Amino acid sequence: MSLQSQRRDDHAGKRQKDNKKAHDNCDAIKRVRRDYDEGMDELPGGARRIAFFGGSFDPPHFGHLAVAHAARSALGLDAVLFAPVGAQPLKPHGSIAGFDDRVAMTRLAIAGEPALAISLADAPDASGKPNFTLETLLRVRARLPFDGRLFCLMGADSFLTLRRWHRAEEVPFAAPMIVASRPASSSSGRRPEDLKASLPAGLKLEPAPDPALPQSEFEVRAYCLHNAAGESAPFYLLPGLHIEISATEIREQIRAASGSAGASQRVLPAAVAEYIRSHGLYR
């Protein structure tokens, strides 16, 4: 065989492998979607008040768990759905860890927590289309029991980008928002003027009477959102969460430690830290 023929065969072999990899990835995405459609991310039994908690979870850490527990306690939620996102429109370079790894780590992080569940509603789209929160919320809401109530839980850092979201003005009316403020955001996102500055055009925010909520150690501030069509939606702020954990800093610490998650043990569930180590993530 000539050298030129061998090179052609090598290139053909590489294309075949690349095509197989792309096909396998597409099949994996379709399986994730099928799993979601078949209800494999079932809600805890009897859950009616449910918060959708979307994010990269790259990696999931104790801060995420603290936000979920605080929201459950303060708003009387039955369940919180942790939903790793496939492709965030505001993060064009994507997440560091792959979707499957982030789902696996999130499952480990919430293991043993009966009121916390995994959701695949924000899995990657086989077409490569970005994941839009509004579309995901509407899809999840349609699957709830007839008397179910869906909320959208997020940190203040996510809320402060709300204006840039797809059809942002519709999101709070698809599911009432619960915003957890953290010291990392300083006072930003805690005061009414900060909240108003982050709202999409056409939405108005005003204080609401104290809602009938269960007693909790966590403070809740209630507001009401109004749009130009005359619709209104509740809006809740949890202003007192003393959580200062950055997923970016965790990844940097692991990278600096040559792949060891030991330096981040205090902010990562042990099972998540072991998964990162054994799978060589964030090196």
Image: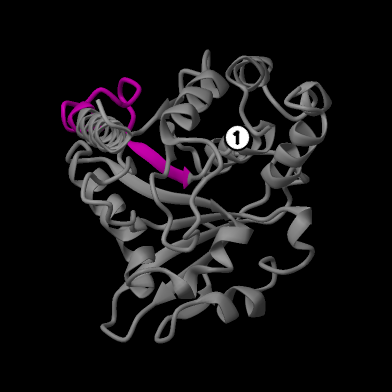
Q: What percent of the width, then of the height, locates residue 167?
A: 32, 72
Q: Quadrant of residue 161?
A: bottom right
Mark 1 = which residue?
59
Q: What percent of the width, then of the height, locates residue 229?
A: 26, 83
Q: Amino acid at mark 1?
A: Pro
Tell me if 173 is positioned left or right of 146 in this view: right
* 90 vs 103: above or below: below
Q: Which span of residues is magenta-colored? A: 32-54
Q: Residue at x 35, y 80 (%)?
A: 227
Q: Residue at x 70, y 46 (%)?
A: 248
Q: Residue at x 83, y 27 (%)?
A: 263
Tell me if 144 is positioned left or right of 69 in this view: left
Helix, strand, or loop for circle 1?
Answer: loop
Most foreground residue, 203 or 201: 201
* 237 vs 256: above or below: below
The quadrant the C terminus occupies is top right
